[in-house]
Image (spheres, rainbow, N blue to C red):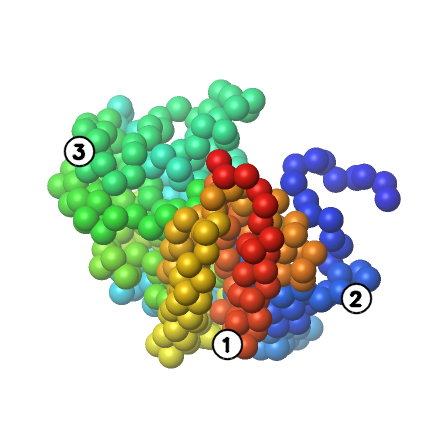
Protein backbone atom coordinates (compact mmCIF):
# COMPACT_ATOMS: atom_id res chain seq x y z
CA UNK A 1 0.00 0.00 0.00
CA UNK A 2 1.41 3.44 -0.89
CA UNK A 3 1.72 5.53 2.23
CA UNK A 4 0.13 8.82 1.20
CA UNK A 5 -1.02 10.12 4.56
CA UNK A 6 1.18 12.33 6.71
CA UNK A 7 2.24 10.37 9.74
CA UNK A 8 0.11 12.29 12.25
CA UNK A 9 -1.88 9.46 13.86
CA UNK A 10 -0.83 6.40 15.82
CA UNK A 11 -3.24 4.28 13.82
CA UNK A 12 -4.32 0.80 14.80
CA UNK A 13 -3.98 -1.90 12.12
CA UNK A 14 -7.49 -1.99 10.65
CA UNK A 15 -9.24 -0.70 7.52
CA UNK A 16 -12.96 -0.07 8.02
CA UNK A 17 -15.42 -0.36 5.17
CA UNK A 18 -18.87 0.03 6.68
CA UNK A 19 -20.87 0.46 9.85
CA UNK A 20 -24.34 -0.09 11.23
CA UNK A 21 -25.62 0.78 14.69
CA UNK A 22 -22.83 0.12 17.19
CA UNK A 23 -20.95 -2.13 14.77
CA UNK A 24 -18.14 -1.42 12.31
CA UNK A 25 -16.97 -3.90 9.65
CA UNK A 26 -13.44 -4.01 8.24
CA UNK A 27 -12.39 -4.73 4.67
CA UNK A 28 -12.07 -8.47 5.47
CA UNK A 29 -15.62 -8.68 6.86
CA UNK A 30 -14.66 -8.81 10.57
CA UNK A 31 -17.11 -6.98 12.86
CA UNK A 32 -16.18 -4.73 15.79
CA UNK A 33 -18.30 -3.38 18.61
CA UNK A 34 -17.70 0.38 18.68
CA UNK A 35 -17.20 1.82 22.17
CA UNK A 36 -15.59 4.99 20.76
CA UNK A 37 -18.26 6.69 18.56
CA UNK A 38 -15.40 8.10 16.45
CA UNK A 39 -14.27 9.97 19.61
CA UNK A 40 -17.72 11.15 20.68
CA UNK A 41 -18.92 11.93 17.13
CA UNK A 42 -21.19 9.08 16.01
CA UNK A 43 -23.49 9.58 18.99
CA UNK A 44 -26.40 7.93 17.17
CA UNK A 45 -24.19 5.10 15.96
CA UNK A 46 -23.45 4.32 12.33
CA UNK A 47 -26.02 4.84 9.58
CA UNK A 48 -28.77 5.90 11.99
CA UNK A 49 -31.80 5.73 9.66
CA UNK A 50 -33.29 9.16 10.43
CA UNK A 51 -29.86 10.80 10.12
CA UNK A 52 -29.11 9.13 6.79
CA UNK A 53 -32.58 10.01 5.55
CA UNK A 54 -32.19 13.69 6.49
CA UNK A 55 -28.79 13.91 4.79
CA UNK A 56 -30.19 12.18 1.70
CA UNK A 57 -33.25 14.44 1.53
CA UNK A 58 -31.12 17.54 2.00
CA UNK A 59 -28.71 16.50 -0.77
CA UNK A 60 -31.28 15.08 -3.19
CA UNK A 61 -34.16 17.50 -2.80
CA UNK A 62 -32.87 20.67 -1.19
CA UNK A 63 -29.31 22.04 -1.31
CA UNK A 64 -25.85 21.27 0.00
CA UNK A 65 -24.46 24.73 0.49
CA UNK A 66 -25.18 28.41 0.24
CA UNK A 67 -22.83 31.20 1.20
CA UNK A 68 -23.27 32.67 4.66
CA UNK A 69 -24.13 35.95 2.91
CA UNK A 70 -27.56 34.30 2.62
CA UNK A 71 -29.52 32.06 4.90
CA UNK A 72 -30.96 28.59 4.36
CA UNK A 73 -34.16 27.41 6.02
CA UNK A 74 -32.44 24.21 7.21
CA UNK A 75 -29.57 26.08 8.90
CA UNK A 76 -31.91 28.63 10.45
CA UNK A 77 -34.16 25.95 11.95
CA UNK A 78 -31.16 24.05 13.27
CA UNK A 79 -29.66 27.17 14.87
CA UNK A 80 -32.97 28.08 16.51
CA UNK A 81 -33.33 24.57 17.89
CA UNK A 82 -29.75 24.55 19.18
CA UNK A 83 -30.10 27.87 20.98
CA UNK A 84 -33.36 26.60 22.49
CA UNK A 85 -31.61 23.44 23.72
CA UNK A 86 -28.92 25.57 25.39
CA UNK A 87 -31.32 28.21 26.76
CA UNK A 88 -31.51 26.56 30.22
CA UNK A 89 -27.91 27.69 30.82
CA UNK A 90 -28.63 31.16 29.43
CA UNK A 91 -27.48 30.86 25.81
CA UNK A 92 -29.04 33.39 23.42
CA UNK A 93 -27.18 33.30 20.08
CA UNK A 94 -24.91 30.98 18.10
CA UNK A 95 -22.11 31.14 15.53
CA UNK A 96 -21.74 27.95 13.51
CA UNK A 97 -18.34 26.62 12.48
CA UNK A 98 -16.92 23.28 11.31
CA UNK A 99 -14.90 21.83 14.17
CA UNK A 100 -14.15 22.05 17.85
CA UNK A 101 -10.93 24.00 17.42
CA UNK A 102 -12.74 26.57 15.30
CA UNK A 103 -15.49 26.88 17.89
CA UNK A 104 -12.89 27.57 20.60
CA UNK A 105 -11.10 30.08 18.35
CA UNK A 106 -14.42 31.91 18.07
CA UNK A 107 -14.91 31.82 21.82
CA UNK A 108 -11.44 33.32 22.43
CA UNK A 109 -12.16 36.10 19.92
CA UNK A 110 -15.43 36.93 21.69
CA UNK A 111 -13.77 37.06 25.12
CA UNK A 112 -11.01 39.34 23.84
CA UNK A 113 -13.29 41.72 21.96
CA UNK A 114 -15.78 41.91 24.86
CA UNK A 115 -13.01 43.03 27.17
CA UNK A 116 -11.26 45.36 24.72
CA UNK A 117 -14.45 47.27 23.96
CA UNK A 118 -15.37 47.61 27.61
CA UNK A 119 -12.01 48.06 29.34
CA UNK A 120 -9.45 48.88 26.62
CA UNK A 121 -6.00 47.35 26.03
CA UNK A 122 -4.09 45.07 28.42
CA UNK A 123 -6.89 42.75 29.48
CA UNK A 124 -6.58 40.01 26.87
CA UNK A 125 -5.32 37.01 28.85
CA UNK A 126 -7.32 33.80 28.81
CA UNK A 127 -6.88 31.44 31.75
CA UNK A 128 -7.05 27.72 31.06
CA UNK A 129 -6.62 24.59 33.17
CA UNK A 130 -3.69 22.22 33.32
CA UNK A 131 -4.63 18.93 31.67
CA UNK A 132 -7.09 20.61 29.30
CA UNK A 133 -7.39 20.04 25.57
CA UNK A 134 -8.92 22.69 23.33
CA UNK A 135 -7.75 21.89 19.79
CA UNK A 136 -4.88 21.77 17.33
CA UNK A 137 -4.74 25.23 15.76
CA UNK A 138 -1.96 27.48 17.02
CA UNK A 139 -4.34 29.43 19.28
CA UNK A 140 -6.24 26.43 20.63
CA UNK A 141 -2.92 24.65 21.26
CA UNK A 142 -1.90 27.79 23.14
CA UNK A 143 -5.06 27.33 25.23
CA UNK A 144 -4.32 23.64 25.83
CA UNK A 145 -2.84 22.94 29.24
CA UNK A 146 -0.59 20.03 28.37
CA UNK A 147 3.16 20.53 27.92
CA UNK A 148 3.50 17.81 25.29
CA UNK A 149 1.48 19.90 22.83
CA UNK A 150 3.68 22.94 23.37
CA UNK A 151 6.63 21.70 21.35
CA UNK A 152 7.91 22.43 17.86
CA UNK A 153 5.22 24.84 16.67
CA UNK A 154 6.04 28.08 18.38
CA UNK A 155 5.74 30.96 18.65
CA UNK A 156 2.32 30.31 20.13
CA UNK A 157 -0.48 32.83 20.50
CA UNK A 158 0.39 35.15 23.34
CA UNK A 159 -1.91 35.67 26.34
CA UNK A 160 -2.74 32.28 27.83
CA UNK A 161 -1.91 31.08 31.32
CA UNK A 162 -2.66 27.90 33.20
CA UNK A 163 -3.88 26.94 36.64
CA UNK A 164 -4.22 23.64 38.47
CA UNK A 165 -7.84 22.37 38.38
CA UNK A 166 -9.39 22.26 41.85
CA UNK A 167 -7.08 24.89 43.35
CA UNK A 168 -9.50 27.74 44.15
CA UNK A 169 -6.79 29.95 45.64
CA UNK A 170 -4.62 29.69 42.53
CA UNK A 171 -7.65 30.50 40.38
CA UNK A 172 -8.47 33.53 42.51
CA UNK A 173 -4.91 34.81 42.02
CA UNK A 174 -4.77 34.01 38.30
CA UNK A 175 -8.00 35.86 37.47
CA UNK A 176 -6.41 39.30 37.76
CA UNK A 177 -6.88 42.63 35.93
CA UNK A 178 -5.22 41.28 32.76
CA UNK A 179 -7.76 38.48 32.23
CA UNK A 180 -10.75 38.52 29.86
CA UNK A 181 -11.72 34.85 29.81
CA UNK A 182 -11.57 31.52 31.63
CA UNK A 183 -11.93 28.37 29.52
CA UNK A 184 -12.89 25.10 31.21
CA UNK A 185 -13.90 21.60 30.15
CA UNK A 186 -16.30 20.68 32.94
CA UNK A 187 -15.21 17.11 32.31
CA UNK A 188 -11.72 16.91 30.85
CA UNK A 189 -11.86 14.32 28.09
CA UNK A 190 -8.43 13.88 26.53
CA UNK A 191 -6.58 13.81 29.82
CA UNK A 192 -8.69 10.99 31.30
CA UNK A 193 -12.41 11.78 31.79
CA UNK A 194 -11.79 13.99 34.80
CA UNK A 195 -14.82 15.88 36.13
CA UNK A 196 -14.21 19.24 37.78
CA UNK A 197 -14.96 19.57 41.47
CA UNK A 198 -18.39 21.31 41.82
CA UNK A 199 -17.03 23.70 44.49
CA UNK A 200 -14.24 24.71 42.11
CA UNK A 201 -16.72 25.45 39.31
CA UNK A 202 -18.92 27.38 41.69
CA UNK A 203 -15.93 29.51 42.71
CA UNK A 204 -14.99 29.98 39.05
CA UNK A 205 -18.50 31.25 38.26
CA UNK A 206 -18.40 33.62 41.21
CA UNK A 207 -14.94 35.06 40.38
CA UNK A 208 -15.87 35.50 36.72
CA UNK A 209 -19.13 37.27 37.58
CA UNK A 210 -17.46 39.59 40.13
CA UNK A 211 -14.60 40.51 37.76
CA UNK A 212 -16.57 40.57 34.50
CA UNK A 213 -14.47 37.76 33.02
CA UNK A 214 -16.21 35.57 30.44
CA UNK A 215 -16.55 31.94 31.47
CA UNK A 216 -16.23 29.62 28.47
CA UNK A 217 -17.34 25.99 28.86
CA UNK A 218 -15.70 23.80 26.23
CA UNK A 219 -18.33 21.07 25.85
CA UNK A 220 -16.92 19.74 22.61
CA UNK A 221 -16.43 16.26 24.03
CA UNK A 222 -18.78 16.18 27.03
CA UNK A 223 -21.75 18.07 25.52
CA UNK A 224 -24.69 17.05 23.29
CA UNK A 225 -26.08 14.56 25.79
CA UNK A 226 -22.89 12.57 26.35
CA UNK A 227 -23.14 12.78 30.14
CA UNK A 228 -26.94 12.42 30.39
CA UNK A 229 -27.84 16.11 30.38
CA UNK A 230 -27.83 18.04 27.10
CA UNK A 231 -24.89 20.11 28.35
CA UNK A 232 -22.58 18.72 31.01
CA UNK A 233 -22.56 22.11 32.79
CA UNK A 234 -26.31 21.74 33.45
CA UNK A 235 -25.59 19.01 35.96
CA UNK A 236 -23.38 21.48 37.87
CA UNK A 237 -26.13 24.10 37.88
CA UNK A 238 -23.85 26.75 36.36
CA UNK A 239 -24.54 29.36 33.67
CA UNK A 240 -21.45 30.08 31.57
CA UNK A 241 -21.13 33.09 29.26
CA UNK A 242 -20.03 30.97 26.28
CA UNK A 243 -20.43 27.28 25.40
CA UNK A 244 -18.57 25.55 22.58
CA UNK A 245 -19.82 22.37 20.91
CA UNK A 246 -18.74 20.18 17.98
CA UNK A 247 -18.11 16.40 17.62
CA UNK A 248 -21.52 14.71 18.17
CA UNK A 249 -23.58 17.76 17.26
CA UNK A 250 -24.22 16.55 13.70
CA UNK A 251 -23.71 12.83 14.34
CA UNK A 252 -20.74 12.49 11.95
CA UNK A 253 -20.91 15.51 9.64
CA UNK A 254 -18.32 18.21 10.50
CA UNK A 255 -19.76 21.01 12.62
CA UNK A 256 -18.82 23.38 15.44
CA UNK A 257 -20.82 25.91 17.45
CA UNK A 258 -20.06 28.86 19.70
CA UNK A 259 -23.04 29.82 21.82
CA UNK A 260 -23.17 32.97 23.88
CA UNK A 261 -25.40 34.28 26.66
CA UNK A 262 -26.61 37.78 27.52
CA UNK A 263 -23.19 39.43 27.98
CA UNK A 264 -21.50 38.04 24.90
CA UNK A 265 -24.24 37.35 22.35
CA UNK A 266 -23.76 40.62 20.46
CA UNK A 267 -20.00 41.05 20.75
CA UNK A 268 -19.24 39.81 17.23
CA UNK A 269 -20.52 42.20 14.60
CA UNK A 270 -20.51 42.21 10.80
CA UNK A 271 -17.03 41.42 9.47
CA UNK A 272 -15.62 40.26 12.82
CA UNK A 273 -15.77 36.55 12.14
CA UNK A 274 -16.88 34.09 9.49
CA UNK A 275 -16.56 30.71 7.87
CA UNK A 276 -17.21 29.51 4.33
CA UNK A 277 -18.76 26.22 5.36
CA UNK A 278 -19.84 26.97 8.93
CA UNK A 279 -23.40 25.76 9.58
CA UNK A 280 -23.89 24.62 6.02
CA UNK A 281 -27.31 23.09 5.25
CA UNK A 282 -26.00 19.51 5.04
CA UNK A 283 -24.45 19.71 8.51
CA UNK A 284 -27.54 21.53 9.78
CA UNK A 285 -29.87 18.83 8.42
CA UNK A 286 -27.82 16.21 10.27
CA UNK A 287 -27.64 18.36 13.41
CA UNK A 288 -31.40 18.80 13.45
CA UNK A 289 -31.85 15.03 13.70
CA UNK A 290 -29.31 14.81 16.53
CA UNK A 291 -31.13 17.55 18.46
CA UNK A 292 -34.57 16.05 17.83
CA UNK A 293 -33.37 12.64 18.98
CA UNK A 294 -31.08 13.46 21.87
CA UNK A 295 -32.73 16.49 23.43
CA UNK A 296 -35.65 14.70 25.08
CA UNK A 297 -35.88 13.83 28.79
CA UNK A 298 -36.38 10.10 28.17
CA UNK A 299 -33.42 9.79 25.78
CA UNK A 300 -31.12 11.65 28.19
CA UNK A 301 -32.38 9.56 31.09
CA UNK A 302 -31.54 6.43 29.13
CA UNK A 303 -27.94 7.64 28.69
CA UNK A 304 -27.67 7.99 32.48
CA UNK A 305 -29.15 4.52 32.97
CA UNK A 306 -26.63 2.97 30.57
CA UNK A 307 -23.82 4.82 32.34
CA UNK A 308 -24.97 3.44 35.68
CA UNK A 309 -24.91 -0.07 34.21
CA UNK A 310 -21.31 0.43 33.04
CA UNK A 311 -20.26 1.74 36.44
CA UNK A 312 -21.96 -1.09 38.32
CA UNK A 313 -20.46 -3.73 36.04
CA UNK A 314 -16.88 -2.46 36.09
CA UNK A 315 -16.94 -1.83 39.85
CA UNK A 316 -18.32 -5.35 40.45
CA UNK A 317 -15.15 -6.82 38.88
CA UNK A 318 -13.01 -5.39 41.70
CA UNK A 319 -10.18 -5.99 39.26
CA UNK A 320 -6.57 -5.79 40.45
CA UNK A 321 -5.51 -4.05 37.23
CA UNK A 322 -8.09 -1.25 37.66
CA UNK A 323 -7.28 1.66 39.95
CA UNK A 324 -10.44 3.77 39.51
CA UNK A 325 -13.48 4.22 37.30
CA UNK A 326 -15.22 7.51 36.53
CA UNK A 327 -18.59 7.45 34.79
CA UNK A 328 -20.70 10.40 33.65
CA UNK A 329 -23.43 9.02 31.41
CA UNK A 330 -21.72 7.42 28.43
CA UNK A 331 -18.37 9.11 29.09
CA UNK A 332 -16.19 6.67 31.00
CA UNK A 333 -12.60 6.71 32.23
CA UNK A 334 -10.98 3.59 33.66
CA UNK A 335 -7.59 4.14 35.30
CA UNK A 336 -5.34 1.12 34.79
CA UNK A 337 -2.26 0.17 36.79
CA UNK A 338 -0.23 0.06 33.56
CA UNK A 339 -0.28 1.89 30.25
CA UNK A 340 -3.61 1.94 28.44
CA UNK A 341 -2.52 2.10 24.83
CA UNK A 342 -1.37 -1.56 24.42
CA UNK A 343 -4.84 -2.70 25.53
CA UNK A 344 -6.42 -0.94 22.56
CA UNK A 345 -4.64 -3.22 20.14
CA UNK A 346 -5.59 -6.34 22.05
CA UNK A 347 -9.22 -5.18 22.30
CA UNK A 348 -9.23 -4.55 18.54
CA UNK A 349 -8.07 -8.10 18.05
CA UNK A 350 -11.00 -9.26 20.20
CA UNK A 351 -13.48 -7.17 18.17
CA UNK A 352 -13.90 -4.22 20.53
CA UNK A 353 -12.96 -0.59 19.83
CA UNK A 354 -11.93 1.45 22.87
CA UNK A 355 -9.86 4.61 23.42
CA UNK A 356 -7.15 5.73 25.75
CA UNK A 357 -6.84 9.11 27.47
CA UNK A 358 -3.69 10.37 29.12
CA UNK A 359 -1.21 7.53 29.70
CA UNK A 360 -2.96 5.00 31.93
CA UNK A 361 -6.67 5.62 31.33
CA UNK A 362 -9.00 3.64 29.10
CA UNK A 363 -11.79 5.80 27.72
CA UNK A 364 -15.17 4.48 26.64
CA UNK A 365 -17.55 6.65 24.59
CA UNK A 366 -20.21 4.26 23.25
CA UNK A 367 -22.94 5.49 20.90
CA UNK A 368 -26.08 6.57 22.79
CA UNK A 369 -28.24 4.08 20.88
CA UNK A 370 -26.35 1.08 22.23
CA UNK A 371 -28.66 -1.68 23.52
CA UNK A 372 -28.20 -3.11 26.99
CA UNK A 373 -27.19 -6.48 25.58
CA UNK A 374 -24.54 -4.91 23.33
CA UNK A 375 -23.26 -2.96 26.31
CA UNK A 376 -22.98 -6.15 28.36
CA UNK A 377 -21.26 -7.97 25.46
CA UNK A 378 -18.74 -5.17 25.03
CA UNK A 379 -18.03 -5.05 28.76
CA UNK A 380 -17.46 -8.82 28.76
CA UNK A 381 -14.84 -8.39 26.02
CA UNK A 382 -13.32 -5.49 27.95
CA UNK A 383 -13.09 -7.73 31.03
CA UNK A 384 -11.23 -10.39 29.06
CA UNK A 385 -8.88 -7.74 27.65
CA UNK A 386 -8.13 -6.46 31.16
CA UNK A 387 -7.74 -10.03 32.49
CA UNK A 388 -5.10 -10.53 29.85
CA UNK A 389 -3.28 -7.33 30.78
CA UNK A 390 0.31 -8.24 31.55
CA UNK A 391 1.62 -4.72 31.12
CA UNK A 392 3.84 -3.76 34.06
CA UNK A 393 2.48 -1.13 36.50
CA UNK A 394 3.71 2.42 36.05
C1 LIG B 1 -12.66 19.25 24.76
C2 LIG B 1 -12.20 19.39 23.34
N1 LIG B 1 -12.08 20.62 22.82
C3 LIG B 1 -11.69 20.80 21.55
C4 LIG B 1 -11.40 19.72 20.73
C5 LIG B 1 -10.98 19.96 19.31
O1 LIG B 1 -11.99 19.56 18.42
P1 LIG B 1 -11.69 19.32 16.88
O2 LIG B 1 -10.81 18.11 16.78
O3 LIG B 1 -13.04 19.11 16.26
O4 LIG B 1 -11.03 20.55 16.37
C6 LIG B 1 -11.51 18.43 21.23
C7 LIG B 1 -11.15 17.27 20.42
O5 LIG B 1 -10.87 16.20 20.88
C8 LIG B 1 -11.92 18.27 22.58
O6 LIG B 1 -12.05 17.04 23.13
Q: Residue at x 50, y 29 (%)?
A: 148
Task: For marks 2 and 3, give the one nearer the viewer.
Answer: 2
For disc 2, the marked residue is 29
| Vertical relation: 340 (above or below) 19 | above
Asked if the residue at label 2 sits under 8 Å from ligand 1, the reply is no
Q: Distance between the residues labelled 2 and 1?
A: 24 Å
Identify the mark nearer the N-term, 2 or 3: 2
SS of the residue under disc 3: helix
Q: Position of residue 374 (x, y in %)?
A: 56, 73
Q: Residue at x 34, y 58 (%)?
A: 232
Asked whether disc 3 touches disc 1, contact meaning CB atoms under 8 Å apart, the reply is no
- Residue closest to the eye, 342 or 165: 342
Asked whether disc 2 touches disc 3, contact meaning CB atoms under 8 Å apart, the reply is no
SS of the residue under disc 2: loop
Q: How crowded is mark 1: few (under 14 residues within 10 Å), some or many (20 or more)?
A: few
Q: Position of residue 357 (x, y in %)?
A: 49, 45
For disc 1, the marked residue is 372
Amino acid sequence: MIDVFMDTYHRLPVLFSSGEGVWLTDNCGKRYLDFTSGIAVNCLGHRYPALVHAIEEQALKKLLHVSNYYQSDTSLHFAQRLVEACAPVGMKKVFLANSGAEANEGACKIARKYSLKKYGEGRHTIVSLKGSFHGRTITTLSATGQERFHRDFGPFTEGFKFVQPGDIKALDQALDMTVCGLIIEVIQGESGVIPQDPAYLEAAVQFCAERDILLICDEIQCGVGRTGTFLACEAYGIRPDIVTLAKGLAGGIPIGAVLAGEKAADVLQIGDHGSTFGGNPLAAAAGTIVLKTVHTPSFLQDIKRKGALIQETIESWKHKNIKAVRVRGLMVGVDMVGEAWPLLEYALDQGLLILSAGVCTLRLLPPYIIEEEELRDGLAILRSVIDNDTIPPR
